[in-house]
Amino acid sequence: AQSVTQLGSHVSVSEGALVLLRCNYSSSVPPYLFWYVQYPNQGLQLLLKYTSAATLVKGINGFEAEFKKSETSFHLTKPSAHMSDAAEYFCAVSDGPTGFQKLVFGTGTRLLVSP
Amino acid sequence: NAGVTQTPKFQVLKTGQSMTLQCAQDMNHEYMSWYRQDPGMGLRLIHYSVGAGITDQGEVPNGYNVSRSTTEDFPLRLLSAAPSQTSVYFCASSSLDRGDEQFFGPGTRLTVL
């Protein structure tokens, strides 16, 4: 069975600081990995996805993530946090690439950005 | 495009009542799904559909029914609500050729007393 583990339910950074949100996965097949963002009172929005093409994936709003098979990790980073980045972030895994993608989500990490 | 829409936004039910959460998408997506979001547990898949007339169970299907008579609509039915079904419910859709990119609705917050 596939699973993801997100370390830290809350991460606090100052505006302009590096953002690092951690995600480790477990999968018996080559995984498809995703990061979603949820702003308050909204649905989830896809930030970026890894589908076995490039190990460094760039997403929207300046975020990127690197797939490291040896560490079974897919951590999300952003060089400089902005106040508008405050949201909840979810890592997810599926066994893609064909058919309906049954996403298995992590428990989420709430990013707090202080001025 | 409105994308994925859900109604109602909020609902309070008493134990044993029934209701239907509505979900519609205008992107002509083949795949649609329902997730529930609970604190500290992320999102979990309830039911999904790969096309009109075809549905299947996800991780937590008990207590929920679905049907898909049209491409656009995918309602979720609670036949006899229980307090354990208090949650935020999200509907999502994706296309046949971009199944890895799911579009989520804004959610329905359901409280069962």
Image: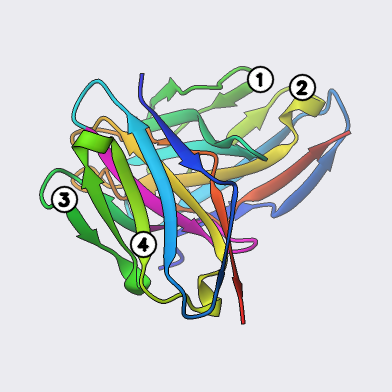
Instruction: Evaluate whether label 1 is on the same chain as label 2.
Output: yes
Q: Could you tell me residue A24's position as x and y percent?
A: 37, 37
The residue under label 2 is: B80
Residue at (70, 38) in percent of width and height: B87
Mark 4, residues whose alpha carbon is within 10 Å: few (<14), some, or many (≥20)? some
- Mark 4 → mark 3, Cα distance in angstroms: 14 Å
Amino acid under disc 4: Thr
What is the secondary structure assignment of the residue under circle 3? loop
Q: Tell me the quadrant of the picture where the N terminus of chain B can be found.
A: bottom left
Kindly report which numbered mark, 3 or 2, lies closer to the viewer in this rendering. 3
Amino acid under disc 3: Thr
Residue at (79, 24) in percent of width and height: B82
The residue under label 1 is: B63
Mark 2, residues whose alpha carbon is within 10 Å: few (<14), some, or many (≥20)? some
The residue under label 3 is: A55
Instruction: Evaluate whether label 4 is on the same chain as label 3.
Output: yes
B7 horizontally vs B91: left or right: right
What is the secondary structure assignment of the residue under circle 1? loop
